Amino acid sequence: MMEPMDGRKPVDVAGRFRRLCPAAWMARAAAAFLLLVVCGSVRGERIKDIVEIQGVRGNPLTGVGLVIGLAGTGDTGLLSRQMLTNILRESGLVLSPSDLSGGNIAVVMVTGELGPFHREGMRIDVDISSLGDAKTLQGAMLLPTPLKGLDGQVYAVAQGGVSLGGWSVAGKQASLSKNHQTVGRIANGAIVEKAELASFVEQVAGQRFITLSLRNSDFSTAQRISDVINQSYADSAFVLDAASVRVMVPPDITQRNVIAFLDEITQKEVTVDTPAVVVINERTGTIVVGENVGISSVAISQGSLVVKVKETAQVSQPMAPFSDAGSTEVIPETMVGVEEQNAYLIPVERAVTVSELAKTLNAIGASPRDLIAIFNALKEAGALQAKLVIM
């Protein structure tokens, strides 16, 4: 939009150009979009998005509990009644399992995860799964259940109403349900009773170290992480292996500033190096091609044999109508046709990018199943310069 100096109405130059030259405008817009794509493709990834900090992890918690309030859809076995008997005895009621009837209670497994920075009094989510023959946990209420870690200590206590995210209705002859009815969740359903403090700063010979673990192991990416950290803190980072980079905390960084130091180095961006891999899932026909996959110069021909089978029924009628000379019969007739589709030998030049590779293979007009066969054949011929992974 251009603003005249004499105060007249502004002239929309871009709008006029768009109306007069639509093709040129579209080409210009496409070029601008391509420029944005190219500029965006060179952007790196933050270190914090591609690594885990060694020592910062969660711990699984489990416990066996009892849910009540089921409308006749609970367990019918002895285990649930025995657990209810034990709970009632703690309340001063002395009963035996034979005195109780099942149907409104169910034994469940309660699982959760204690985060690395959860403290006493904080709440965590828990999942509830039926252990018996309960038909549904709809309307269930979990009684207080201690959750233990692998060391046998109680770290949290869970209780509350179970949410299934669905429903179930049933009659005498039919039933209807939405989602899985024997697995539920209690949001903020457990209170942390004991914290498991995460320790991510390692003391070695009077020096403090932090280890960054790559989610996808790669020597090139690990070296790039080390290099970009050393640009700000010289000789502080070094590569242990393809999955680990150790960072020395500088002596001038005080204990209270370690978090700020860690935040600074993990905000830096690096270019992630991806290996040349082709992943094939033959069950679903899914093919994923990595960025650096290349194909040597080859010629590809993909043809297929089509077999058509058609079943028809012929009615055989006696020659003399209304006579006992024969009977009317239905005779099946099968017609089989074989057709071999034409296969052409298509030369494929060396492709070095995913877009070139996709364009080349799409020119053949092959289906996903054909592409799976082509990639397998390219690997056998030594023309696929990538690792082939078949799921």
Image: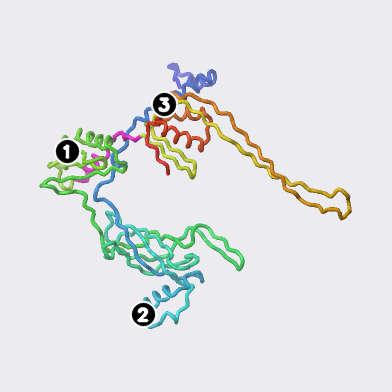
Measuring from the top left, give residue 250's x and y in whole percent. 14, 41
Badge 2 element: helix
Instruction: Look at mark 3 in the image and give the residue it sits on.
Output: 351
Of badges 3 and 2, nearer the viewer stands: 3
Measuring from the top left, give residue 341's x and y in whole percent. 59, 31
Q: CA distance from mark 1 to mark 2?
A: 62 Å
State yes or no: residue 260 in magenta: yes
Q: Earlier in the sequence, mark 3 or mark 2?
A: 2
Look at the numbered discs 1 and 3 and tell me whether their residues touch, using CB distance below 8 Å.
Answer: no
Measuring from the top left, give residue 288's x and y in whole percent. 43, 38
Q: Earlier in the sequence, mark 1 or mark 3?
A: 1
In this view of the protein, can residue 24 be seen by the observer?
A: yes
Badge 3 element: loop
For the point 56% across and 34% down, the residue is 304
Residue that sits furthest to the front in the current view: 325
Read off the magenta span: 258-275
Give the vertical position of 76 relative to 215 (above or below).
Answer: below
Name which residue type carries label 1. Ser
